[in-house]
Image (spheres, grey):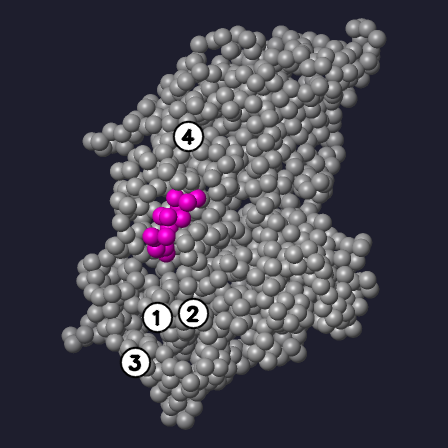
Amino acid sequence: MYNQIENDFVKRFRFLRNFLVNHKFLKNRVIDKQTIYALKLKKGIYLNTKQSSGVDIMVKYSFENGNFVIDSFDKAKTFSSFLPGIAGLKGIPMWAFYVNRGQAISSFGIQDKGQPILEFSPASITYQNVSRNGFRTFLKVNGELVEAFDSTNESEHIKRKMYINEAQVSILERNEDYGFEIKVDYFGMPQENFAALVRKVEIKNITDQDLTIEVLDGCTAIFPHGVGNADYKAVGNLLRSWMDVYNLEQDYAFYKLRASTGDEAEINEVEKGNFYLSFSDEEELIKPIVDADLIFGHDTSLAKPVNFSSTSLKEIQNSEQITANKVPCGFTGINKVIKANETVRINTIIGHAQDVNHIENQKEKLVDAKYIDRKQTEAYNVIRNLTDDIDTKTGNKLFDEYARQCYLDNLLRGGYPIKLKNKKDGFVYHVYSRKHGDLERDYNWFSIAPEYYSQGNGNFRDANQNRRNDGLFNPEVGTYNIKTFMSLIQMDGYNPLSVEGSSFNLKAGSDVEELVNKCFNSHQDDVKNILKNNFTPGRIINYIYNNNVDLKVDEETMLEEVFSQSEQNIEASFGEGYWIDHWTYNMDLVDTFLRVYPDRLEELLFEDETYKYFDSPVYVLPRSEKYVLNKSGNVRQYGSLLHYDDEKLKHLGIESRATNWIRTENGKGDIYETNLFVKLLSLGLVKYSSIDPAGIGIEMDGNKPGWNDAMNGLPGLFGSGVGETFELVRVLRLVKEACETFEGQSVNVPEELALLLAELTDRVNKFFEGKINQHTYWDQVATARENYRESIRFGITGKEITINLSELDQVIKSMLDKIEIGIEKAKELGDGVYPTYLVFGATDFEVVKDEAGNKVISHYGLPKVVVNEFKVRALPRYAEAPARSMKVIKDKEANLLLHKNVQATEIYDKKLLMYKTSESIADESNEIGRARAFTPGWLEREAIFLHMTYKYLLGLAKAGLYDEYIEAVKTNVVPFLKPEVYGRSTLENSSFVASSVNPNPHVHGQGFYARLTGSTAEFLSMWTLMMYGNQPFRMVDGELIAEFNPIIPGSMFDEDNKVSFKFLGHTTVTYVNPKRIDTYNESLSTQKIQLVIEGETTTVEQSYLPQKYATMLREGNVEEVTIYFG
């Protein structure tokens, strides 16, 4: 033991001596004992000396040259994030996650976390393991071994930084002890027919002497393709039996299993593989080290490269590599002499290919430093070009970049709309989307199709809200989103959970033979087979590229020919449960459309007669089947759904996970189609019929709560949502507006819906006539709803009833009046703040018994009951209902009072000056849901959930409370937060911020769960209000006008007194505000408007643009607009 310590001492002594000589601290190689002792104290490198953990580590956050920079990132608060996973329309995306520990990248792969190249683990595990199980760089500098980015090396002469932008993440270490600086860039490979992560490593000599280095740089484990993430965690030892690495003789590695691993009779060959390809300055492939034993030797913990420490790089490279029966790695070795201030570079591409030939045929192209540099720039530009839609220039550069980042993260969940040509209006097609799954959201399964024109999976609510603003940045979207999500609304008022990317199929009667002969020279039979089934543009293009298909026409023409004979399909499936809030986001889509096209209301509501009704294989059971007595003797609502409805599946002959639509002839006829007005009417009637026994909130009768998923116990407590009531008001107001505006028109509705309308009309009239009380009214309306749902269970008859809008108008008014009574009750229950959640206790009930006197047991396994009377109770106050109410309540003073009341509650975190989800729920039981079991100030329990916080801020802006809104922005919107508290880039949202009620004071104000949240949609809505107001286009005396009413504080104008932004994705609008007054100040007015049209300047001497110019602006025919305030 002593000898080992002594040898270590000698080695370190020699290194220090050489270092000091090289840096001219010593004139010769003689060091006296006093110098040695001083070095011991200063460097802390010997036994029983204090390590540099005692040195004050300065974590610093800054924004420099478009990058968010974190000094001493490895000492900062932990966070996780990810590369965008966008490879361009003609690229194959790769997902990649990173953390601020180790060398950043912790996991990457293709399609989903089930197909990793580097193992996927939750954030809590990743923070512990990434420094060993990930990318590593070992250097021998003048013979001395050191590891770059080694968290255990805390020398005060080592400085580390992390650089983050939309497209890449970089890390840098400056090591003055050893005289080098190393920088690592990571980015996804764009616009190629394979998916890859690129790692660019640059090692610079920062001394004025030559450095002789040996380097081993790479990744400690690379999974062969075919290894599933969950399988590896469960039976990883077994899976080694299939593993192998190929093509080392070609100086790159191709990793795959030898055959399929399933315990089945049919065995499949594995052709696809993961690959590792690397080169340095000579631009020649460097054979990778794939056998980790050659590097780490007996140290199976991978803590130290034991073999490399005692063996030369050349010896390792010349050693035989064992490639089978073990988890392989991927390391690149170089041996260089780096002159003073010069740099050596290692370029490594790690990815996935359809087969080895994909790489073999391209390797000469890939082994080129200029190619890597071009791709790095291209990767950045792909993202930058997308976010140019929201290009913003204010006096706050961080805010400008934050807007871009929000736009990017919004489209990553909702998709980016493009137009596919089809010789007509084109198909709207969303690319780049995926579900929000990541290291912190380890519970979500994301999927990104590994194909061109890539799209992914999503949930109804998420995709819907993240597409809310599509039409304000890409007006060509038109009514597509409205039609998609309104068609997914079922006749029972609910909707499917899972929404996949759209697909296409050839129209009935299309001549596939003629189409293929017209466009393809080769592979015609295979192409016909693709086109005979559902397909996507990516599936077609992928096949063409992967199989060298010869086209008769260019690619764009081929796609246009195919789509000219195709129809687009919405792909969705039930998933699980029915949330009461999903439908509420549909009205946002309608409002967005009307903000741009207020002159097309009639067209929107009545002209398109091809809206459908989704049909889930699930049945919402009546009260008689789900009102039960639990083991504690309390009445509850359990087992609300018949899931799956086997009788329905059998009767209709449908698949449970397929996309199914309501059909006529009791499910045996054609798909029923109607217009948007009827869809809104049916939605409004069903939701109106779902108002709770107190006449206030919308019942949770589908087994799920609303936006706050963690209140999952509320349906069992007969819970209802007040926020959804305000959204119902929006629907019914639009229906009423249409009835008034188009009173001479009539609509045809299914007879089943007409009967429900008649029942509701009768009951609301009787209620206002005083013939029935509230409980009787509720009971009869609920019965009407249950009868209606029973009548549509197996489809509809297809018979229609004509309804005159002039007659419908009065009915809708009565319903709105009835709802208003409930809203006033809600305010009383919440002491001036609308409660979000109500629960009901059964105060009078009867246990259902059969003729023999035995309790009748429900399908859930508990005795059935009939409830004769309920008592309502409001839960502690939440931010959601007040946020939603301010979009509906038109009284500005009432909204101001509501806001002050909210600030007086625990919803307002007085330490952080931010808005939480709710007050304390400590006095509630665990029965309300998992939120009660969460730690206070964490996740949905009393934390600052940015989505809801931003929704509340948006409510303030929509209510006209501009001063209050701007004041709230300063302490609640991410770029204005202190990064040292927030703990991650203040360009990026997080799902929630831990509030000051959390028992750990160190996390107060810190953000968790990266980026992909509904907060991005809320911010984009806030951005549009700030930049140009709620209604940029309006109808005045039958004429279309454009008028901008921004909500921008004077402090946000730049040094030239300007703010500019991209309007509708195509026109640059600039405000000139010499007085730097808040734009919403009544003393400020528009003096003139200058337009640039085809290079010519036109001046409009008024505050708005008349129809001629408004139309040109909307159609993208105005290049620039400059508005002068005074």
Judging by the rendered image, the residue that carries numbered circle 4 is 353
Coordinates of residue 436 in the picture (x, y in percent):
48, 49
Tag 3 and tag 4, C-beta contact below 8 Å: no
Does the magenta-highlighted stretch encompass residue 563?
Answer: yes
Does the magenta-highlighted stretch encompass residue 591?
Answer: no
Which quadrant holds the N terminus?
top right
The alpha-carbon separation of the residues under discs 2 and 3 comes to 34 Å
* First in sequence: mark 4 vs mark 1: 4
Judging by the rendered image, the residue that carries numbered circle 3 is 801
Q: Nearer the viewer, mark 2 or mark 1?
A: 1
* First in sequence: mark 4 vs mark 2: 4
* First in sequence: mark 2 vs mark 3: 2
Q: Nearer the viewer, residue 245 or 662?
A: 662
Residue at left offset 75%, top offset 53%: 395
Residue at left offset 40%, top offset 82%: 745
Q: Secondary structure at mark 1?
A: loop
Question: Which circle marks residue 674 in the picture?
Answer: 1
Q: Secondary structure at mark 2?
A: loop
Q: Which residues are magenta?
A: 556-570
